[in-house]
Image (cartoon, grey):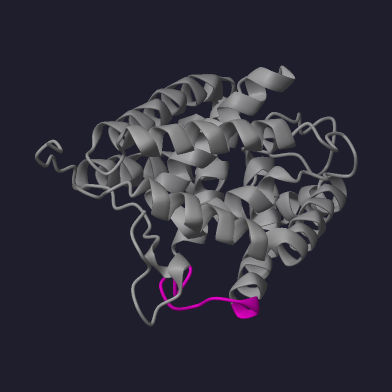
Amino acid sequence: MSAPIPGRPADRQARALRLGPRTWLALALVSAVGVAGFGWPFLAPPDAAVNAHEGDAPWLFAGLLVLLVAVVAAALSESALGAKAVAMLGVLAAAGAALRPVGAGTAGLEPMFFLMVLSGRVLGPGFGFALGSVTMFASALLTGGVGPWLPFQMLAMGWFTMGAGFLPGPDRLRGRLEVWMLAAYGFLAAFAYGTVMNLAGWTFMSSLASNIAFDGDDPVSANLARFVAYCLATSLGWDLGRAVITVMLTLTVGATVLRALRRATRRAAFEAPVTFGDAPR
């Protein structure tokens, strides 16, 4: 094993994986489609035809799933994700999928979120998006949660994990300050995840069943007020539980997990070129 660089902490040698232009293009495409898929109730005018065909949404779900698979395939096919990175992707996705059932159904206590935050921080936004999407897909298979909501969960979790890779100071910020930054991000992102996912199910509520349901005949301002009321009434408690458990786990074991991830990344040397020397005589 190579010696640490003099004058620098050993874990600073761990570098986030760099993804090529095809992957970033795929990320931009799927994110644009995802924004349209999540936000169409607010993007379309009240008299648009899409508001009269809420039942067409499952077709969008299917198309979004295809695009998500394309993003992961593009990431895996580019040089930055070699065999070692694919192995780590599988290990972390399996760990995240195993953590999701722990506390499932109990006030939104989902410990997998803190692992996604730390993994995205260490391994970068591109790897983070692939990891978040694959982890959600694997956990759905494990828990039997496969349904039309799954592509949106994969996309939202991909965004959640990718965002941690964009946080400042990946090569300089260490110690308690970094852990507190990640805890703050996890807290806010847990609420953002729940809010975004509410859009996936809110439009399926019948306006006759509730006065906080989506109504295609109402203007955007009225539907926005309905959506805020819907979030407060249905998911605030779950989002708070998710945010609190993410903060608690990040502050208590985050530093240890960060060191372990950086050590594994450094030893794997994902992007180190492979060289062949003469065999010993």
Is 85 on the left or on the right of 140, as rendered?
A: left
The quadrant of the rendering that contains the C terminus is top left
Outermost residue on the right side: it is: 106
Residue in front for this viewpoint, 34 or 230 = 34
In the picture shown, does residue 272 fall above or below 217? Answer: below
Q: Is residue 66 magenta?
A: no
**Quarter of the image holding residue 3?**
bottom left
> Is residue 170 shown above or below 143?
below
Determine whether 4 is above or below 165 in the image.
Answer: below
Residue at image location 22% in from the left, 47% down from the top: 20
Going 24% across and 50% down the picture, which residue do you hit? 272
- Please name whichever residue, 83 or 242, is drawn nearer the observer in this view of the structure: 83
The secondary structure that dominates the magenta segment is loop
Most extreme residue toward the left is 278
Q: Which of the pair 98/258 is nearer the observer?
A: 258
Residue 199: give x, y in percent of width and height. Answer: 64, 42
Q: Nearer the viewer, residue 95 or 220?
A: 95
Query: Which region shows up in magenta?
Result: 167-177
Which residue occupies 59% across, 20% down? 55
Q: Position of residue 103 (x, y in %)?
A: 85, 38
Residue 163 at least partly seen: no
Q: Taking the image as drawn, is residue 239 in sight?
A: yes
Counting from the top left corner in percent of width and height, residue 65 is at 46, 25
Left or right: residue 155 versus residue 83 is right
